[in-house]
Amino acid sequence: MREPIRDKERLEHILQAINNLQEGSKHYTPEQAEKDSIIFYGFVKQVEIIGEATYKLTKEFRASHPDVEWDVIEGMRHVLVHGYYSITPHKVWRVISNDLPVLRPQIEAYIKELSE
């Protein structure tokens, strides 16, 4: 069984990775990242961290917060790790541009909820 006391810490990891991705995307375009594999895979790693931290959340926490598609987030991590050859900067930027602005306030609210 996963540790319930760890949910807040995992959420904080997710939020930090979101912050890193959003800040980093201000300094690079997908085209620039594509030209520098170290930069590109730095972005990929941050998305992986979001997926791994999601996987480590307790089943109870995930079930009690069904407004987030936890399985989709976890699945993205599997794609990035096991299907690394099919990932493009534009796919990663779609996550940064479309998914993270929605996910961020949810994660912030959950951290606040667990802090009370």
Image (cartoon, rainbow, N blue to C red):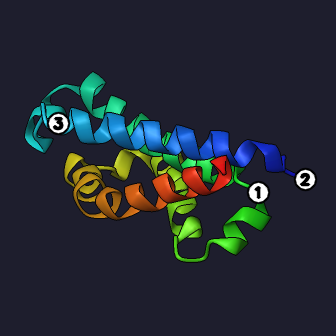
- Give residue 12's position: percent from left, percent from top: 55, 40
User: Which residue carries the number 3 mark?
Assistant: 34
Residue 57 in sight from this viewpoint: yes
| Residue nearest the viewer, comparing 14 with 110 | 110
Labels 1 & 2 near each other (Cβ < 8 A): yes
| Residue nearest the viewer, comparing 72 with 59 | 59
- Distance Cα–Cα, label 1 vs label 2: 8 Å
Q: Secondary structure at mark 1?
A: loop
**Closer to the camera: disc 3 or disc 2?**
2
Which residue type does callout 3 highlight? Answer: Glu
Query: Is 89 on the left or on the right of 29, as rendered?
Result: right
Quadrant in which residue 47 is drawn: top left
| Residue nearest the viewer, comparing 57 with 94 | 57
Which residue type does callout 1 highlight? Answer: Thr
- Distance Cα–Cα, label 3 vs label 1: 35 Å
Disc sitting over residue 58 in the figure: 1
Disc sitting over residue 109 in the figure: none
Q: Secondary structure at mark 3?
A: helix
- Identify the residue at the far bottom of this view: 66
What's the residue at 54%, 61% (across, down)? 75
Please tell me which of labels 1 and 2 falls first in the chain. Answer: 2
What's the residue at 57%, 66% (across, down)? 70
| Category of crowding for the residue at label 3, using alpha-carbon neighbours closer than 10 angstroms: few (below 14), some (14–19), many (at least 20) | some
- Give residue 58's position: percent from left, percent from top: 76, 57
